[in-house]
Amino acid sequence: MGTAIDRFDERARRTFDSIGHTEVYRGELLRHPVYTRVLHWMVALFFFLALFTGFGIYLPWLFRWFTPFFGGGPLSRLMHPWFGLGFVFFFFLQVLNWLVPMRWCNADTQWMRGIGKIVGGKEKLDPPDTGFFNAGQKVQFWEIVGGCVVYLITGFILWGGARYFGGIAVAVSYVLHDISALIMLGGIFIHIYLSTIGEPGTFQAMTRGAVSEAWAWTFHPAWYKKVTGRDAREAYEKARQQQSSTTPKPS
C-alpha cells in the first residue's frame, strides 16, 4: 500500500513539475514543489468556500451577507456540500503527499515538552532534531484529518436528512459538524498567524516554494542538516558572527 502511494505521489510530483516551475536562489532551499503548493491552495480555497456557504446556511441572521456571493440562500445550500467534498478530496491527496513526514516520532514529543520556550521566544532555534515538520504542525495536520472524517460522516447525514437517517442522527450531526468547523477555523487562524507574523519567511514556502537557509536552520534544524549536510547551530553562529563583524560600531 505504501509503495503504491509513493508511486502515485511521485507521478503527481513529476507531472506538476513539468507544468510549473520553482526558482531557488542562492542562499535558499527548496521547501515545497509545485504539486504540494497546488494541493495546499486548493485545500484552502475549498475550505473557505465551504466555510462561507456554511456560515450563510447555519447563521443567516449574522452571515446572510455571504449568500449573495453564491447566488442566494438556496444555491448556497446546494453548493455547500460540494465545496465540502472538494475540500476533503484535495486534503486526502495532501495526506498522501505528506503521510511520511507527518508521522509522529520521539523528536516531536520532546518538541511538545519544550513548547513554552519555543512559543515564548526564549529559544532562538527550534530543537536540533526538528525535522521537515515540527510537532505543532503535525498536531494540526492530524486534527484536520479527524475533522475531515467528521465532516464526511455528518455531512452525508445532513445531506440525506431525517428521511434517510432519522431526526436524532441529523440533530447530533448538526452539533458535531459545527463543533468540528469551529475547531478547524481556530486552527486556521493559528496557521495563518504562524505562516506570516509568527514565523517570518514561511509564507513564501507555499507561494514560491523556497525558503531561506536562515529560516530552515531556525525552525527545522534537522531538515536543514539533512538537505545541506551542515549543522544548524553552527550555521546560525557563523551568520551571527558575520552580522556582528559587518555592523557599524557607534563612534
Image: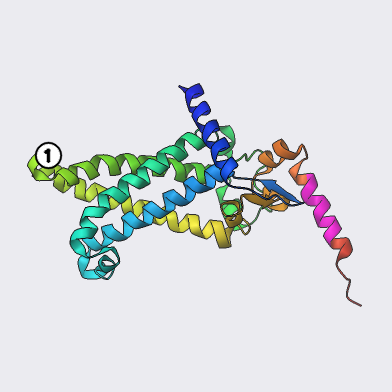
Q: Position of residue 25 (x, y in %)?
A: 73, 52
* Residue in the picture at 51% in, 22% down: 3
* Residue in the picture at 80% in, 51% down: 237
> Which corner quadrant of the image does residue 19 belong to?
top right
Name the image quarter holding the C terminus: bottom right
Q: Position of residue 13 (x, y in %)?
A: 55, 37
In the picture as drawn, the residue positioned furthest to the bottom comes out as 251
> Is most of the magenta stretch helix, strand or loop?
helix
* Residue in the picture at 32% in, 39% down: 149
In this image, 69 relative to 204: left or right? left
Q: Position of residue 84 (x, y in %)?
A: 31, 48
Name the image quarter holding the N terminus: top left
Q: Position of residue 125 (x, y in %)?
A: 68, 50
Answer above or below: position of 248 versus 96: below
On the question of residue 41 being in view, the answer is yes
Answer above or below: position of 144 versus 3: below
In this image, 149 relative to 116: left or right? left
In this image, 137 relative to 145: left or right? right
Check residue 235 for magenta coloring: yes
* Residue in the picture at 66% in, 39% down: 223
In this image, 201 relative to 104: left or right? right
Q: Closer to the camera, 99 or 246? A: 99
In the picture as drawn, the residue positioned furthest to the front comes out as 19
Q: Residues within 10 Å of mark 1 (few under 14, many from 20)?
A: some
Magenta residues, start to end: 234-243
Question: What colour scheme has been applied to the protein in the rendered image?
Answer: rainbow
Q: Closer to the camera, 160 or 140? A: 160
Give the residue at mark 1.
Answer: 165
The kind of residue tagged 1 is Phe
Check residue 88 for magenta coloring: no
Secondary structure state at the residue bearing disc 1: helix
Q: Closer to the camera, 165 or 89? A: 89
